[in-house]
Each structure stands twice: as C-alpha cells, then as structure tokens.
Image (cartoon, grey):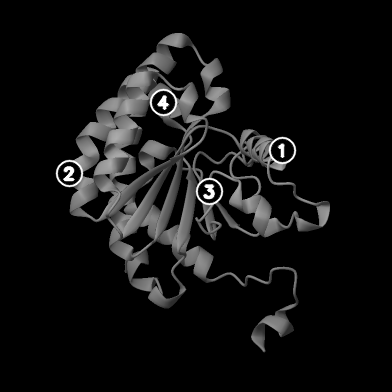
Amino acid sequence: MSFKDKIVNEKLPQHIAIIMDGNGRWAKKNGKERYEGHYQGVETVHKIVEASAELGVKFLTLYAFSTENWHRPKEEVDALMHLFVETIEQELPTLNKNGIRLRAIGDIASMPQQNIDNLNETMAKTEHNNKMDLVLALSYSGRWEIMDAVKKILKDQQTNPISAGEITEELFSSYLNTAGIPDPELLIRTSGELRISNYLLWQIAYTELYITPKLWPEFDKEDLYEAIVDFQNRERRFGMTSDQIKR
C-alpha cells in the first residue's frame, strides 16, 4: 500500500516548507559534476510540486537559494542563476496547467537582473492561479528577513509612529516577506542534516520537523507522502497538555 493511501485529507497540512539539501553530495556519490546534481534536483522539484498540488496542499515553500549560498564558488553560483532562469521558463506551462501561483521571498533585488525580470514575468503570468501557491525562497535567510522587517517598521515609524505596546506578533508578521502566508505546519529537510539553516526562523515556531536521510535528487512522491503520514500521526499540542488537546 502506498503512503498516499494512508493520507487523511481532512488532516492535510496546508503549508509545507522544504529545505532541499544534498544536490552536491548526490552528484559526488554518482561521479558527476555539482551542477549536474542541481539539474537532477530540478527534476525532483517538478515531481514534488505536482504531487503537492494534486493532494490539495495550499502553500509549498522551497528553500532554493540562501543568502549564504552567494559565498559558493562563482562558477557554481553562475550555473545556479542560469538554471533558475531556464527552469522558471520551462515550468510556466506546468504551473498554469495545475493552477499554481508562483511567489518569491528573499532579497530578490540582490539577484542578477535577468533572474529578477524572468521571475517577475512568471509571477505575473500565474498571479490568477488559485489551487496552490509555490513560494521560492531566493537569496533568503531567516535572520535577513527579521532584520528587514525591523528596518521597515523603523522606516514607517518616521511617518506613522508606533508605540511599543502596538508591536504585536501579528503586526511584526505583517512586515515579514511571508505576510499573508500561513506558517508552515510541516518542514521537510532532506540529506539527514539536523539543522534549520537559517530558514523561516520566525514562522517555524511550532512547525513539525521531518528529517530524511535521502538526498534531494533521490526524494520522490512516495517520500513526500510518507512525510505527510508521519505528520498526521503526531500530536500537536502548541504548549498545552494532551488532555487539553483532546477536550
């Protein structure tokens, strides 16, 4: 029996976030260049995005490129930037066919202009799709996002003073890149690494974590279904006791 058959639709996580890790290690393990691992990783993205939309997941956020990734060798960064442009162009028909809206979070202005233009064009061409939001975290880090939100609040403070008592979690969240997007219920990390890697630090306060030893290019639809089943078998207490949850 497939794990897909065990999924309870009524308990489906509405927002899944993924740290797609292991492209380089997959390439090394298979005697290939690192860029070939990234190309193989794109194939996995295609499968997981389609599978998520088919299930009825409303938001899928993928950690595609972190602010720290700019420190990688220039040839690898250049290859990744080219791959982003190529992939977004190729995936547009699939996004529209599946009713998927493309969105992006991160320091997008720091990316090459061709990437920015291509991204904006694709987001515009999918903005009316409403089956699922695919959110790409590009040139993103959780600390950068939090600092960016603080800067925005201070800037607004100059024209619209805000008292300390008015700064609530809801207000602060409205200044984040993810404003209007619900916090992820499930965070999947591939490659077996046991860390968050500066990803959605504010948003994952009560997110369930699922770590798999599989490298991202090896991760398939059945692995996604297994992660969701594992999530559905957990008891989410949000600081309360089991007895309180069961009432």
Tell me the residue at 31%/24% (across/down).
83
Give the residue at mark 4. 29
Camera-near label (4 vs 2) is 2
* Spatial separation of the CA atoms under disc 4 and disc 1: 54 Å
Residue 91 in picture, x, y percent from top left: 23, 39
Q: Residue furthest right?
A: 164
Q: Residue at x 81, y 57 (%)?
A: 165
In percent of width and height, residue 59 lies at: 42, 56
Pick the front one: 55 or 146? 146
Amino acid type shown at disc 2: Pro
Where does residue 190 sit, x and y in percent of width and height? 49, 42
- The reply to whether discs 4 and 2 touch (Cβ–Cβ < 8 Å) is no
In primary-sequence order, the first of circles 2 and 1 is 2
Secondary element type, mark 4: helix
CB atoms at circles 4 and 1 under 8 Å apart?
Answer: no
Q: Which residue is mark 1?
A: 158
User: Given the image, on which type of amino acid does mark 3 rest?
Assistant: Thr
Q: Of marks 4 and 2, which one's residue comes earlier in the chain?
A: 4
Q: CA distance from mark 2 to mark 1?
A: 44 Å
Which label sits in the foreground, 2 or 1? 1
Q: Residues within 10 Å of mark 2 (few under 14, many from 20)?
A: few
Task: Report, in whole angstroms, how far the alpha carbon at label 3 lies from the one at label 4.
Answer: 36 Å
Mark 3 against mark 4, which lies toward the viewer? 3
Lower sequence index among marks 3 and 2: 2
Precedes in sequence: disc 1 or disc 3: 1
Q: Amino acid at mark 1?
A: Gln
Rounded to the nearest angstrom, the CA distance separating label 3 from label 2 is 25 Å
The residue at which mark 2 appears reads as 93
Vertical comparison of 38 with 19: above or below? above
- Residue 172: x and y, percent? 67, 51
Residue to which mark 3 is pinned: 178
